[in-house]
Image (cartoon, helix red, strand yellow):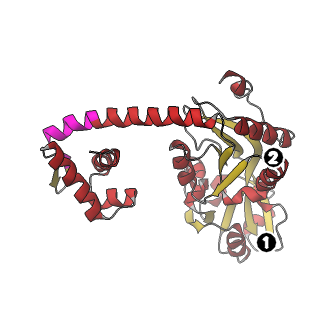
Amino acid sequence: MDFNQLRYFLALTKYKYFTETANELHLSQSSLSKQIKALEKELNYKLIERTMKGCELTEEGIIFKKFALDIMKRHNILVNKLEEVSSKSSNTINIGTMPIMSEYKICDEISCFMSEHLNYNINIIELPNVQDLVKLMENGELNLVFIGERLLNKEEFLEIPLIKDRLVFIVSSKSELSKFDKISLSKIKFETLILLDKITGLTDFLLPYLRSAPKIMSGYTNSNTILSLVRDNVGVSIIWKNLLNGVDLKDLKVINIEEDLSGHIVLGIPKGRNISTAEVDFKNYIEKRFSNKLVSNGSHENYFNNI
């Protein structure tokens, strides 16, 4: 029995089906099936029953699941403790970021930090899917992350706000809406709304405000594609205002939204573990560079003094 077998078993109890579980674990279905069978053979008990509703635990499986959860929890605690010891002397920082961070000049600041701290090794992991960044943070594969606020679990991560931004409408100059300087979300219920892909987190941020939801076109990771469609009056878009800096707005109009749809780009830091000197230096550097844009909520001021 090994930790991978326990992880596969617990994943199967979560997703119920071998196909879905194998996809989540990036395994073939046959490999997953072999691992589960090997586990059952070693224990000499059947743990899983296949049914029309997916996989169900046997009585033995229910008992085993409790022990498996406890073992994996203790294993993760051990790994985290060992990583904490290692991180104290580590000069490596793994930083996660989204592609749109370049528009906020964050990538430029990371490059400046690297040029001023040649003794540190900086690994930048850029991913378009915010949920992938969140998973890497939760798994401890990233030390820090630049991400939109409210995407991290606040019980596990500290969010240091860096840049405030707000959402605006952008419409074609041909649109009837272009005569307005400010409009409410309710005004677009009959419009086609063109948004950045769901993986960027924007759709989830907007949905609570779109009670009378218009037709939504999403799946776009490039804001230039959206602007081109809006320019042709295919629909209207809602986009973070800072992403429009330096963009050619010919035949387009930016309109303020009556509702307060603002948010922050934050620096996410895990709670409950020791922070290396390299991470402290990076955090301090970033805060100083963005001090003119930083919106302090007072929650992080003494964090690095108390860990």
Magenta-drawn stretch contains 58: yes
Q: Position of residue 106 (x, y in %)?
A: 77, 52
> Circle 2 — which element?
loop
**Direction bottom: furthest residue:** 232
> Circle 1 — which element?
loop
The circle on residue 21 is none
Q: Against 189, is 173 above or below?
A: below
Residue linked to disc 1: 173
Q: Of the residues shown, which amino acid type is indicated by label 2?
A: His
* Quadrant that contains the C terminus: top right
Residue linked to disc 2: 117
Q: Position of residue 218 (x, y in %)?
A: 57, 66
Q: Which residues are magenta?
A: 56-67
Q: Compare residues 276 and 112 and report the one nearer the observer.
A: 276
Instruction: Tell me the mark number nearer the camera, choosing from 1 and 2.
Output: 2
Is 209 positioned to the left or the right of 24 in the image? right
* Quadrant that contains the N terminus: top left
**Direction top: furthest residue:** 306
Image quarter of residue 89: top right
